Image (cartoon, grey):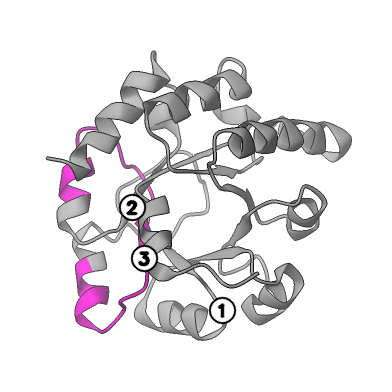
Amino acid sequence: MARIDSSVMRDLLKVYFISGSTNVSTDLSHVLKQAIDGGVTIFQYREKGEEALTGEEKERLGKELKDICQTRNIPFIVNDDIDLALKLDADGVHIGQDDGNVPEVRKKIGDRILGVSAHNIDEANNALRDGADYLGVGPVYATSTKQDTEKVCGPHFIAELREKGIDAPIVAIGGINQANAAKVVRGKADGLSVITAISKAEDPTVATAELASVWTR
């Protein structure tokens, strides 16, 4: 198995859905299926927050979600939990700056997809040097989903990273929704990552399709 090609990675990042059981008011598996119908290109299982599942329950839901993604040919990424990712044979993992040593994570997961959050040029360069396949950059806008976020950087920050030589695949993170997605795309992101814009939508299929449409406008 070889590391994923950057051009393929860019396409997979277009509509990046992130969710765990705490982010939905209904069944996450059903929401994921609806979102894939609408055009989700990659999914990250992020089980965080109060009342988040742990142990066997977390693993059981993860397996269910992974099976859905596998059936629909959507990459399944696990947030933070390297051991769970390996146990579920996930397609990859995403880690933050405080979630682990990038070279060590790369060694553990082999050629699986590795995403790393970056908030400045040094973090971006270090992550790519150490083995990241894509960068998660943000928060682009204010978000209530994560309580320990960095300072809001705005969509223009991704363009600044491009000007400084960061040519790797980048997915924008934080506060993105149907109303501001086009502005983020103009800021030179390769993809849009969202939680509540899909997980809390009245119709996840329609909500996802609206996000996906910004790439064809």
Cα separation, mark 3 vs mark 1, equals 16 Å
The amino acid beneath tag 2 is: Gly
Placement of 51 over or under 139, stated as above or below: above
Rounded to the nearest whole Å, what is the CA distance between mark 2 and mark 3? 12 Å
Residue 77 is situated, as x and y percent measured from the top left of the image, at: 60, 50
Labelled pair 2, 3 in contact (Cβ < 8 Å): no
Q: Which residues are magenta?
A: 159-184
Looking at the rendered structure, the secondary structure element under dot 3 is helix
Q: Residues within 10 Å of mark 1 (few under 14, many from 20)?
A: many
Identity of the residue drawn at 73% across and 53% down: 85
Q: How many marks?
A: 3
Residue found at x 54% / y 41%: 73
- x 43%, y 61%: residue: 9
Q: Is residue 137 visible?
A: no
Q: Position of residue 111 (x, y in %)?
A: 64, 70
Task: Name the mark nearer the viewer: 2 or 3.
Answer: 3
Q: Is residue 124 magenta?
A: no
Q: Secondary structure at mark 1?
A: loop
Element type at mark 2 = strand
Badge 3 or badge 1: first in the primary sequence: 3
Residue under numbered circle 1: 131
Residue 47 location (% of width, % of height): 66, 40
Query: Which badge, 2 or 1, is on the more N-terminal residue?
Result: 1
Quadrant housing residue 21: top right
Q: Is residue 21 left or right of residue 59?
A: left
| Amino acid residing under circle 3 | Ser
Q: Which residue is mark 3?
A: 7
Q: Classify mark 2: residues with Cα within 10 Å, few (<14), some (14-19) or many (20+).
A: many
Q: Which residue is the site of mark 2?
A: 191
Mark 1 is on which residue type? Gly
At x 42% / y 52%, what residue is drawn? 12
